[in-house]
Amino acid sequence: MNVAKDNEEMLNQKLKEFYELKRNHPYHYQEWVTSGELADRCRKILNDVALVIENILKELGYGNGITVKVARGASYYPKSPWIAILFSGEKVSNGVYPVVGFYGDVDGMFIGCVESVANDQNGFTERFCLADDVAKHGHNDGLMSRYGFDKNPHIANQVAFFPSDMQVEIESVIISLKQAIEVYKQYVINRDEES
C-alpha cells in the first residue's frame, strides 16, 4: 500500500468535487447558510481534505500538538473556506497560522500562512491576502512585511497556489506545508522577540 499515492488520489478526488460544487453553485450568502445543504456538502468534502492534511502532517512528525480545523462559518458558510493548522495554544480567532485555503472566486487551492480576522483592522479580505497576492501578482509582500517575515525573504515568499485545472502532486503539497510551517515558526520567533 502506497500511502503517498493514496493521499494524492484522495486529495485530487476531493478537490475535484469541491471545485464542481463551487462552479455549480456560485457563492451567494443566502444559499450558503451554515446549516444548509451546500455548506454541509462543502464541509464534508473539506473534512476529507483535512484528513489527507492530517496524514501528511503525521508523516512529517507533527502528529502531536497540532489541530487541523475546517471552516464552519457563523451564520453563513465562508466564501473563502479554509483548513487551519493550529499549533498548541493557537486559535483561528486570534493569530497567524498555516492554512490550506480556497480564495473566494479564485479557482484553486493555496497553502500558506494567514492572519485571523480578529487581528485584522481592514476587514475580512485580509485573511486571504496571501492567496490573493499569489494568485494575482505572484508575491505576498504585504502581510509578510507587517509581521517581520521580510527579514527572511526566502521563507516569506513561500506561499503555494495550486490552480484547479491541474492535478495536485502530493510531494508539492508536502513541500508547501513544510514551508508554511517554517513561515509560522518565523512569525512566532519575531512575535516573541517583540514581547
Image (spheres, rainbow, N blue to C red):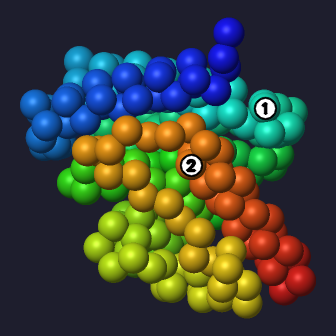
Residue furthest top as drawn: 1
Q: Which residue is mark 1?
A: 59
- Screen quadrant of the C terminus: bottom right
- Between 173 and 109, which is closer to the camera in this rendering? 173
Q: CA distance from mark 2 to mark 1?
A: 15 Å
Q: Is residue 135 above or below residue 122?
A: above
Q: Is residue 127 above or below residue 177?
A: below
- 147 left or right, relative to 16: right
Query: At which x and y percent is residue 14?
Result: 38, 25
Going 41% across and 64% down the picture, which residue do you hit? 131
Query: At which x and y percent is residue 53?
Result: 61, 34
Going 45% across and 49% down the picture, which residue do you hit? 101
- 175 left or right, relative to 90: left
Location of residue 125 by image quarter: bottom left
Query: At which x and y percent is residue 127?
Result: 45, 64
Q: Can you see residue 70?
A: yes
Number of numbered discs visible in the structure rendering: 2
Q: Mark 2 vs mark 1: which is more N-terminal?
A: 1
Few, some or many C-alpha atoms within 10 Å of disc 2 (few <14, some 14-19, many ≥20)? few
Which element type, helix, strand or loop, lies under badge 2?
helix
Q: Is residue 49 above or below residue 23?
A: above
Q: Which residue is mark 2?
A: 172
Query: At which x and y percent is residue 113?
Result: 59, 62
Q: Which one is closest to the eye, mark 2 or mark 1?
A: 2
- Between 112 and 34, which is closer to the camera in this rendering? 112
Location of residue 138 by image quarter: bottom left
- Between 4 and 16, which is closer to the camera in this rendering? 4
